[in-house]
Amino acid sequence: MKTIAALPDGYTVRPAEPADAEALFDMLAAYNTAVVGFADTTLQEVAYCIDRPGFDRTIDGWLVLAADGLPAGYATTLGTGDRRQIDIEVAAKDPEVAGWLVDRTTQRAQEMGRERGHAEVTVDAFVCRTDEPLRAQLSDHGFTTGTSYHRMRIDHTGPAATPAVSQDGPVGVVVRRGAFDDATRWAAHEVINECFRGQFGWVETPHEAWLEANYDLPIFEWAQLTLLEVDGRAVAVRVCSDKYVETENCGYIGMLGVVEEFRGRGLAKFLLHDAFALDAAIGRAGTILHVDTNNPTPALGLYLSVGMNATVVFDGWRRVVPVA
């Protein structure tokens, strides 16, 4: 791995603090605008990420400051579950600063694995395909691409067609709107794990940690979770949030999954059209979701078939790192 011993002259580094949120938002918005053409974040999101559950900002994040004291780079290392798989995020205009941050986040990932007694850890980074400087830094540090993600969007210019049976779903299927009790939340978490187990970057979290993360997320409410049941068994899930309401006036489907034995019955298509209708009814300009193009289900084809189109492409970069 390429090692950068120190930051370039003129830069300093420290943990981000809640009071840094506004200045950090300005830096990240400018960085994202240069890469994808728009800010792609909000002040609320930045403030939340500085001090979110499961993240220790004092040892898992690095705020790089330029000589004028303004943020010039930021990176985080986020471990979930038993810390065998770890996500890193890096943003910096100066390639040398970006390289230092990639190096430091990877080192922290090794430390996390060592603390849990692992022989190696898998480190993932998700990067916009147009961010050539960061892609080059990851390549220099031994990362390779493992999959790609498309941000899909459908625009709503008027009322969207409501699925034929909006309350009861397809024949024999019951729709449960909202997760307001423990039993429903437990069933939803089980379905999520069953649907996404084995997919790139997916890490199962303990139920209490999953609950804590959702309780603390300012853009999510339990009313935005929908379950489909067959004979009393939860077989499909859709989790929406307000992630893109402020920036694009769009609804967001953060998760949509159907357990394997119930695929091919139109459940995913029902959940999509249902979300489109709900978003259009409250004046949303569109609906957005992300899809892994290497998903074991033909998800990309499904989203294209209902009128969604790709607007941004991200790549998942990965490196397996020994911790010794």
Image (tube, helix red, strand yellow):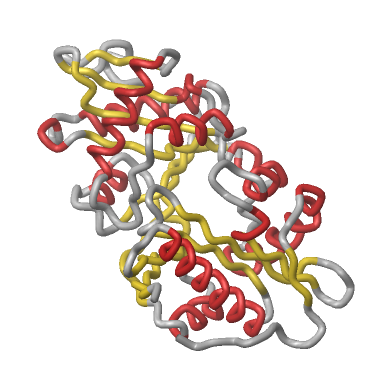
Report if residue 127 is visible in the image. Answer: no
Total of numbered circles in the picture?
0
Horizontal and vertical percent position of residue 35: 59, 68
Residue in front for this viewpoint, 92 or 173 = 92
- Choose top left, top right, bottom left or bottom right for residue 263: top left
Report if residue 217 is visible in the image. Answer: yes
Of the 4 image quadrants, the one containing the C terminus is bottom left
Horizontal and vertical percent position of residue 272: 34, 32
The residue sitting at 78% across, 79% down in the picture is 11
Horizontal and vertical percent position of residue 307: 35, 42
Q: Is residue 269 above or below residue 162?
A: below
In the picture provided, is 171 more to the left or to the right than 281?
Answer: left
- Choose top left, top right, bottom left or bottom right for residue 270: top left
Of the 4 image quadrants, the one containing the N terminus is bottom left
The residue sitting at 43% across, 37% down in the picture is 253
The residue sitting at 33% across, 30% down in the picture is 189
Residue in front for this viewpoint, 178 or 143 = 143
In the picture provided, is 321 more to the left or to the right than 135?
Answer: left
Q: Is residue 315 above or below residue 253?
A: below
Horizontal and vertical percent position of residue 88: 50, 63
Residue in front for this viewpoint, 27 or 271 = 27
Q: Is residue 295 above or below residue 176?
A: below
In the picture provided, is 23 more to the left or to the right than 105?
Answer: right
Q: Residue furthest right?
A: 68
